[in-house]
């Protein structure tokens, strides 16, 4: 559950189980082992995890149920009290989950949430076409609203050499696209004395990988040097995801973010200067403590003024143990909802405008596997425009030239025509 990093880690657990001869339970089958990799970024995430655990316990009576991830690290006792759960593992144990399962299945119920120090490598695609390569874990930033440093520990990473080897393994498996994931990937190198820019250049040299995407990088760590390199690189796509969190400098200070709106605007303008066609996705939080109506309007005006492609909107959620709880002025749930809707509407307009710019153009699209029963298959252009074309199974995991037409009926993709 949760982020792309969790997806990568969960897929790796599935691969490890498969190496022991474990088969994935099909629809309608009762599983012998259930693993839930949880998220705890908001109270809503906690609630969804609790619901999922209850649902899975009920659907798979008698199964050995393991709960791990951020929610398990932060609130193990809540999970301990859930009937049907056999093993609770914190983030430190996630990379060593198979021996823990074997030990737990032959022994007593146990809870393990030790200090988080190790880096567990992960590179998986699950049921998708794109691979997700975990390069870094943990965070040293301690933003006032966030529990991630507690849930995932301090910043740490794998070595460039080991990550390059994982990318080469993807090539051997026929993979063409890798999404680089982590908690704070721009902080890469704490463990090894290397830099994220070093990693980008090394991965770009792996022959056979045709596309890389940087999943999310802090604006203060996205250097002009990285932007310029990606603009002329062999395989890094014109696509960035950059957390803003608020377009108000005063709110950014309350959040203890390490940049201001001027720096963020510079990064967007730099990207547009060297990669005018780039897709830029941005995370924002609305309704955080201290965000008055006036400060929200400042934030909204800033968000309106910058040339980005999409906003991912999160409503602020109170997290126990965070410094944000000391900030006065609490935003009501109704105000949070209204602000979220305003930003979502702005996001929809910006995405529509971005997509519309490319109608009538031809761009490369990596097509993804679809059920033979479906009339269409989907894929993404180099600059992350979602495209649908008539379903042709022989084009699965292939990059093809597609002429982009208008929006589909759902309004979430452009209808494409294959170019011979």
Image (cartoon, rainbow, N blue to C red):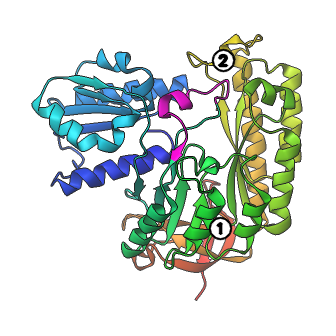
The answer to whether residue 242 is left or right of residue 41 is right
Q: Which residue is mark 2?
A: 323
Q: Quadrant of residue 419?
A: bottom right
Whichever of labels 2 and 1 marks the residue nearer the N terminus, that label is 1
Q: Dot 2: few (<14), some (14–19), or many (≥20) neighbours within 10 Å?
A: some
Q: Position of residue 286 (x, y in %)?
A: 72, 28
Q: Position of residue 58 (x, y in %)?
A: 24, 27
Q: Name the disc covering residue 275, or none.
A: none
Residue found farthest to the bottom = 420
Q: CA distance from mark 2 to mark 1?
A: 37 Å
Viewer-nearest residue: 165 or 374: 165
Q: Mark 2 or mark 1, which is nearer to you?
A: 2
Which portion, as a residue range, is magenta?
142-156
Q: Dot 1: few (<14), some (14–19), or many (≥20) neighbours within 10 Å?
A: many
Q: Which residue is mark 1?
A: 237
Q: Secondary structure at mark 2?
A: helix
Q: Residue at x 55, y 31 (%)?
A: 149
């Amino acid at each position: 559950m949760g982020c792309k990093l969790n997806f990568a880690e969960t897929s790796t657990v599935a691969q490890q189980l498969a190496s022991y001869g474990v088969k994935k339970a099909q629809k309608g089958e009762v599983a012998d082992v259930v693993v839930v990799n949880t998220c705890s970024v908001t109270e809503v995430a906690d609630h969804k995890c609790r619901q999922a655990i209850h649902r899975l316990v009920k659907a798979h009576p008698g199964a050995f149920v393991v709960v791990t991830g951020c929610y398990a690290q932060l609130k193990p006792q809540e999970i301990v009290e859930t009937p049907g759960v056999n093993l609770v593992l914190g983030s430190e144990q996630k990379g060593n989950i198979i021996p823990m399962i074997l030990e737990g299945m032959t022994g007593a119920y146990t809870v393990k949430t030790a200090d988080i120090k190790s880096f567990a490598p992960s590179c998986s695609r699950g049921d998708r076409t794109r691979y997700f390569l975990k390069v870094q874990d943990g965070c040293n930033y301690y933003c006032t609203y966030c529990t991630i440093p507690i849930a995932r520990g301090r910043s740490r990473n794998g070595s460039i050499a080991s990550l390059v080897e994982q990318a080469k393994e993807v090539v051997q498996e026929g993979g063409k696209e890798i999404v680089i994931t982590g908690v704070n990937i721009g902080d890469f190198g704490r463990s090894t004395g290397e830099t994220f820019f070093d990693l980008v250049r090394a991965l770009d040299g792996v022959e056979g990988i045709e596309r890389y995407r940087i999943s999310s990088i802090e604006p203060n760590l996205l250097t002009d040097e990285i932007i310029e390199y990606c603009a002329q690189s062999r395989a890094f796509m014109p696509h960035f995801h950059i957390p803003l969190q608020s377009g108000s400098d005063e709110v950014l200070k309350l959040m203890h973010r390490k940049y201001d709106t001027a720096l963020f605007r510079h990064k967007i303008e730099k990207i547009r200067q060297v990669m005018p066609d780039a897709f830029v996705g941005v995370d924002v939080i609305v309704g955080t403590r201290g965000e008055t109506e006036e400060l929200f309007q400042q934030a909204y005006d800033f968000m309106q003024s910058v040339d980005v492609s999409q906003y991912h909107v999160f409503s602020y959620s109170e997290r126990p143990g965070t410094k944000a709880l000391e900030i006065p002025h609490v935003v009501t749930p109704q105000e949070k909802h209204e602000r979220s809707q305003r930003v979502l509407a702005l996001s929809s307009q910006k995405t529509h405008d971005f997509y519309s710019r490319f109608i009538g153009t031809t761009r490369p699209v990596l097509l993804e596997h679809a059920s033979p029963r479906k009339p269409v298959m989907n894929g993404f252009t180099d600059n992350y425009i979602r495209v649908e074309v008539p379903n042709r199974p022989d084009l699965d995991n292939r990059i093809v030239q597609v002429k982009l037409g208008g929006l589909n009926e759902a309004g979430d993709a452009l209808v494409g025509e294959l170019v011979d």
